[in-house]
Image (cartoon, coloured by chain):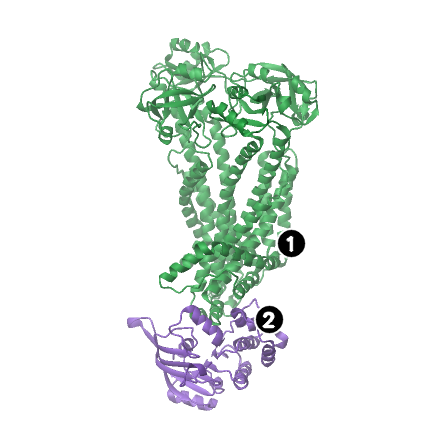
Amino acid sequence: MVGMVGTTTAEVVHAEGIVRVYGEGDTAVHALRGVNVQIEPGQLTAVMGPSGSGKSTLMHILAGLDRPTSGSVQIAGTEITTLGDDALTKLRRKHIGFIFQFFNLLPMLTARDNVVLPLTIAGEKPDQQFFDELIGRVGLSDRLEHRPAELSGGQQQRVAIARALVSRPTVVFADEPTGNLDSRTSGEILDLMRGSVEEYGQTTVMVTHDAKAAAMADRVLYLADGEIVKETGRSSQHEILQIIDTLDLQ
Amino acid sequence: MIRFALQGLLARKLRTALTAIGVVLGVSLISGTYVLTDSITSAFDSIFTENYKNTDAAITGKSAFDPADDGTTTAPAFSQDLLPKVRELPQVGAAGGGVFGEAQLIGRDGKAIVFGGAPNLGFSVDPALPQFNTLSLVKGAWPAAGEVVIDTHTAAEKGFKAGDEIGIQARGAAERMRVSGLVEFGAVSSIGGATLAGFELGTAQQLFGKTGKLDQILIAAKKDVDKQQLIASVQQILPPATQVRTAEDQAAEDAEGTTEFLNFLQTFLLVFGGIALFVGSFVIANSLSITIAQRTREFATLRTLGASRRQILGTVVLEAVVTGFVSAVAGLFLGLAIATGLFNLFDAVGFTLPNNGLVFETRTIVVAIIVGTVVTVVASLRPAWRATRVPPIAAVREGATLQPGRLHRFRPVGAALLALAGIAAALVGLFVDGLKTSTLLSLLGLGVLLLFIGIASFSNRLVRPLAAVSDPIARWSVVVLTALIWPFILLPYWAIRRLFGQHPEFPRVLPDRPAVEIGGQNSRRDPQRTASTAAALMIGLALVTLVATLGAGLIKPFEDAVDGIFSADYAITAQNNFSPLPPSVAAAAAQVPGVSEVTSVRGGQARAFDKTISITAIDKTAPELLRFDWRDGSQASLGQLDPNGAIVDDEYAGDHGLSVGSTLGLEMVTGKVLQFQVRGIFRPPAGGSPFGNVTIATATFDSENPQPQNIYTFLNMGGGVTPENTAALSTALQTFPNAKAMTRDQFKKAQTDSIKGLLNVLYVLLALSVLVSLFGIVNTLVLTVFERTRELGMLRAIGLTRGQVKRMIRQESVITALIGAVIGIVLGLVLAGLLAARLDEITFTVPAGQLVIFAVVSVVVGIFAAIWPARRAARLNPLEALQYE
């Protein structure tokens, strides 16, 4: 898929000059002021920044949920800024997985049905072997017939992770995946996400303001006032906190 | 707190408006009913007052008793010799005599002119005494002998003008007369579609078979003579079988039948308004429950800020008061439109009502506002009480839900008890003998009401299994309906949008499995909510099913009755199937070559055992054409009726201890009491009998009825039913355009068509309740979409297209509608079964075809209800949905 689109881009997501302005005139808010970003395959990329830095807006645009005011975004080689709603929806269906802060499971479905929901929507059958393995990895084998209300927060987020991975999307976007969990559960969830990158080569983009989460990433992008102000490779929690401090990002 | 409540309402305008629709529609039918009946009353009042505007007293013929108003019996006319005697009285200023009767006008096509079921009024006019003349001449001249004036409405509709010739038929064969002029009745151009024909007195007397006789003398007193003096003086010279009344009394007497009818019409329509309001109260209660569940955090915050439970209760109830009041006012004015609509509806089914402008009385306003407000407040009580149970801690807890109340576990028991109490009340009403009709109907109504509430509260237990069954049905019925409209609506719509540069999804027919699967699961996730939403539709469908089943149950035995009684080739009735016909029609038919036997059934009234009863009379040919189910006696008894034999139906015989050989005294309409001997007792067929309680010989009947009328004429022809015979009969009846000859099947169809017409009126009125429940579904869906914003955002993010979102919501809607339909249809059948068990006239017949149609209609209701909520849901931006809260 990636190879088909051209000679220069090995990356799965390619964005150039993204500007996002909310509102007009005097009250206009510039959420993003010309961001260029490439997401490399098989990497876990973390996007860090304080509230209002534009990191969530960036993720929404990269994931095809929002449209930039100007600039270009390609997902798996397809320019998405000109796509109609249906085409964009189908592109998300195929190429993108989501993990949300509030899990966002359907309350009337069992864990099993929640996990296979993206496939159900696409009208596809799950690959049973992969499904079993995935469920084993996220540790839900004995919880498959439970409904979300009968699961703990950590278990619900495991279901959400399995749901994001089950269709083997080109890229998974995670929006503050540990924002609503205690620290021990957060650790387990981060390990799971890291594991999916290592074992399945699952390209993942994670928006977070948790330095511990960012420390699991292969690459960390720092956002402030709608611009990428720094980029580092794999860093320790300590290094990340220092960078945040020096950049005055708190 | 008051300000808080009002601001809350304003902030939720849309939801409040949706909640209120049920009340608006219910109130509008109530106010519409009052406006309609008040308008008709005022129109009739002006007609009746107009009739006697310059009259002080009126002399009329007097029947021995008050005949029922079925057109077969009228008071006998009296000799016109009375008129000069009245004029000679010193107290009398002026007096004028007149006759009236049914005068059928005949159009240029040779067909009788009828507007709906309205009567064809004929009367004499006397231009020499303009003070008694209620007609005003618009064009031409008053009629000379052998001329006629007709009303402007008929003239305009049928293209007649002064100087034209027109056919007239009264008691005898049709004749042609010159139209001397056009008239109007007072200021009213049409009295509810009635045709008017005015004649010179002599002509009228001859037409109506009243030569030398008068029906009425109108008297104006001399100056300074008061009415009582006038009446006293007239009384002195009155011959027997006449009476004198003041003009006011006479007007009230004339209006009596109309008033009774209007009271019935009013109650009848109010019942349907009540039903719509009842359904509306379900919609309100359900919408408020959902809204209150969604406002849990808001109430909890208020509690933490120090609001007491009582204040919370007050806020919610106050919201209900305001909503109820505003919707009642809206409904009040919509009622004006409904009244106009009802006028048109009755007009369309051939039942034109007089209309002299809409009348809006204070009573209408007061009742509409009180009823609307009270219903809304009562419906809000339970949700309001639930709101008081929100604990303050819910303010800080994510996703706090209302705890079920203490009495929650008794709910199914309570619901079952309510339903049982309802059935019990209905059973008592139906099967306990000797109840007054009003008590019976109230018990029945109360029983059905309780049953509905009970079933509605219990039905949440039925939702899961019913939804599971309905799911595939909903799926495939939507597919079939979509396939049906695809080439006509969906494809052109798509093409048009395409042309305008949009990129709509190509319309699909086959079900979208993922979308309908999620939709199906959504319908099961909150059984309480689905059940309450479906309950509103359930009520409407139960009543529609009841009507359909009773209708089928009436028609079947009726057809059996026709087959059982009438063995002739042809039947002759009036064009409208029920008006009586003069005997001259049967006489004309008897002249047709090939007719072997003719028999007519005369209809009329008499008094026996201190009650007015309907009687019929048959002639010597009857045994050959009519069959009786004899308990005592035989066909041969029919031959022994003349002159003083009678046959009696078995119930009447039982009630009055009559057996073959007993004597029975009948006071005839002339006042003469005749003694009859019972010669036979028969069992009338369950589906309706053409015979009165007592049947006597035609010759005897005619001797004591000045103007006998036939209700049916049956005849046999050589060769039976053939096109030639039919044509010969029709030709013979051409001079009687109001009569028609029909074969047995045509006769059955014509008679049952009138039952079907009535059923259609009921369907239209019940449709309002179904409409209210449609809004109930819309309401629930919109509130649900609002509640599931974040969930919808997630689904859109992971790949559900807009079209799929719509289909998902539609599936949920159709399943809800089907659940309501299934419970409603079953309930309707049960109720019909109870009624059929009680009423002999009705056999329990399942109208399978109609029930399928009702189910399809429910699916359509579901589809329509989903349109708007689905559009709202599809428009949600996945991003906003995810950022929500």
What is chain B's hue in the picture?
Answer: green
Secondary structure beneath label 2: helix
For residue B217, say whether it is visible.
no
The picture places residue B276, in percent across and down from the top left corner, at 50, 46
The amino acid beneath tag 1 is: Val
| x then y, percent, for residue A13 | 43, 81
Q: What residue sits right under mark 2 in the picture?
A: A150
Q: Are marks 1 and 2 in contact (CB under 8 Å)?
A: no
Q: Considering the numbered disc 1 on the image, is that residue within a helix, a strand or a loop?
A: helix
B531 left or right of B654? left
The tag on residue B72 is: none
Label 2 CA crowd tier, 10 Å (few <14, some 14–19, many 20+): some
Q: What is the drawing colour of chain A? A: purple
Q: Amino acid at mark 2?
A: Glu
Residue B616 lies, with reference to residue B327, above or below; the image says above
* Residue to which mark 1 is pinned: B413
